[in-house]
Amino acid sequence: MSPPDPAVATSRPAVATSRPAVATSRAVRRAMAGITVAVLAADQVTKSLVAAGRIHDGFSLGWLTVRVVRNHGASGSILSGYPILVTLVALAVTAVAATLAVRVSGRAAALCLAAVLGGALGNLADRLVRAPGLGRGGVVDWIHLSFAGGGSLDLADLAIQFGVLGAVAAMLIAGPARTDGRDRVAVNQE
């Protein structure tokens, strides 16, 4: 058998490959870990301060009021009578957030998903360790908004909501996975 003719080999279109996950970069992994830990720590510290009365219940800044609520259900107190089920769902959501964070191909989306992971871990920690016990704990929501229905949330909820919005926006702006320059050249030579 003779070796393949180089002229024939270069005329074939190259198969487009998608970009590898950004989380393989050491710097991005460190930044993601830092964001996740920072969100988790800020969430747990503020919840502990509020629960201990260091940030006073009823303190108000216009449309924002500190009002401590123990949420044993999901967002909006959905399924509040089934705390173990809600804990299992929170565990699954945390696993999905971690998986997406390490597999996403855009740096901005990866960093936003790290914030989502930190928030998910913060709320999961409440469900696992706060009263009344393992898997039945209530999430300490303490930020009460006087507009938009007056819901209560915490820093973890804010990180989740803004992280998801940021990740979606980053993915939409980045568009579909691009191919490297060699693939474009090979396809253009046809």
Image (cartoon, rainbow, N blue to C red):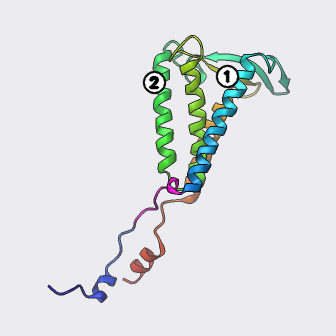
Give SS at disc 2: helix
Q: Residue at x 45, y 19 (%)?
A: 85
* 114 versus 176 height, above or below: above
Q: Amino acid at mark 1?
A: Asp
Magenta stretch: dominant SS?
loop
Residue 147 visible in rendering: yes
Q: Amino acid at mark 2?
A: Leu
Q: Quadrant of residue 88?
A: top left
**Residue 123 at x, y = what percent?**
59, 27
* 11 versus 67 height, above or below: below
**Residue 170 at x, y = what percent?**
59, 53
* 120 versus 59 height, above or below: below
Give SS at disc 1: strand
Q: Residue at x 83, y 20 (%)?
A: 59
Q: Quadrant of residue 70?
A: top right
Q: Are marks 2 and 1 in contact (CB under 8 Å)?
A: no
Q: Which residues are magenta?
A: 17-25
**Residue 16 at x, y = what percent?**
39, 68
Q: Quadrant of the C terminus?
A: bottom left
| Label 2: few (<14), some (14–19) or many (≥20) C-alpha neighbours in 10 Å | some
Which residue lies under the disc numbered 2?
A: 88
Which residue lies under the disc numbered 1?
A: 141
Q: Residue at x 75, y 18 (%)?
A: 67
Q: Is residue 91 magenta?
A: no
